[in-house]
Image: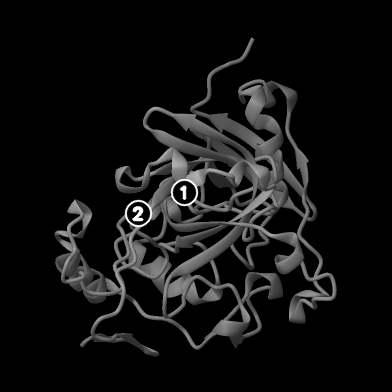
Amino acid sequence: MAHSNMAEGELFLPEGSALLVPIARIHTDYSQKFGIPRQSGLAPDVAGRIVFEPEFSFNKAVAGLEGFSHLWLLWRFENGLAGGSAQDVGHDVGVAAASPAAATAAGPQGTRQVGVHTPAYVGPVAADGCNTFQADAETELARLLAEHVGWAKTVRPPRLGGSQRKGVFATRSPFRPNPVGLSCVRLERVELTSAGPIIHVLGADLRDGTPIFDIKPYVPYADCQPQATGGFTDDLEQPNLQVEFPPELLERVDPSKRRALAQVLSCDPRPVGKEDPEREYALGFAGMEVVFRVHENALHVIDVKGACENG
């Protein structure tokens, strides 16, 4: 049996466990983890396209999906593995971002930081495995086990200001024994092409290229629980900054992206505990770099780079 000793737990893969492979990848305007809303639906106009891997790209496989308004996405967190890019860490403009090692150390506070773009294999290849993407699964598994940085029994949720600890299973922290995420997104439309289906969704909280393990329809009679309680989140207010976007800078943004960008900025992209009104941050979105400062409850956009002038 495979296992890997880690700082606060053990990754345990029993013999005969199933192989978990991506069926698709989602493409969004989030080029980096910094700035992605911490839950799905908080930026409801952010568009995403789910494109299936060749082995699963069959129009028949999504027949009937168009009748649902929302979907559940089961996907892979990229935070639990080493090797991420420094650009994934929120940083001061003109100052080098923190190293991947430093970002990993900061991870248990609940920030979205370190990751890699590789499939997550959580078990050995089946004896009769014949798909091409399974060929190197055992090698990939060994690499992932070697790079896994562990999970924390307790974490500091950003919604609590990063100052209080809660049990990892009482939170949605990405630093879990299994790096699996769950998001509810709105289904915009299902596009059927000669190369297979493309699912267009809104409100996703996933970085561009994130692997999708499964897609399930949201079923109101079973999934909606009006009497549900939200634990320690019930008494918390959702951060909602007032976005001040100078007209001359807004003109640099594609009109079709303006509303979604404003929603992302209003969610307060800053790392927890950063209250310096003079500090500048750079957010990557839709091929742009949006530079901003935050003072009290207002976010001030001060530059937009890498965007074409409109009009």
Q: CB of mark 1 within 8 Å of CB of mark 2? A: yes
Q: Is residue 201 left or right of residue 222?
A: left
The reply to whether residue 270 is visible in this rendering is no
In percent of width and height, residue 290 lies at 58, 37
Task: Tell me how far mark 1 sits from mark 2, CA to CA.
Answer: 9 Å
- Figure check: 94 above or below 16: above
Amino acid carrying mark 2 in the image: Ser
Q: Residue at x 54, y 75 (%)?
A: 109
Q: Residue at x 29, y 67 (%)?
A: 121
Q: Residue at x 52, y 30 (%)?
A: 305
The circle drawn on residue 85 is 2
- Figure check: 178 above or below 250: below
In what quadrant of the picture does the C terminus appear?
Answer: top right
Q: Residue at x 46, y 78 (%)?
A: 176
The circle drawn on residue 160 is none
Picture quadrant where residue 135 is located: bottom left
Q: How many marks?
A: 2
Q: Earlier in the sequence, mark 1 or mark 2?
A: 1
Say which of 72 and 126 sits in front. Answer: 126
Say which of 70 and 288 sits in front. Answer: 70
Q: Which residue is mark 1?
A: 32
Q: Residues within 10 Å of mark 2 (few under 14, many from 20)?
A: some
In percent of width and height, residue 287 lies at 48, 32
Amino acid carrying mark 1 in the image: Gln
Kindly state the secondary structure of the residue where label 1 is placed: loop
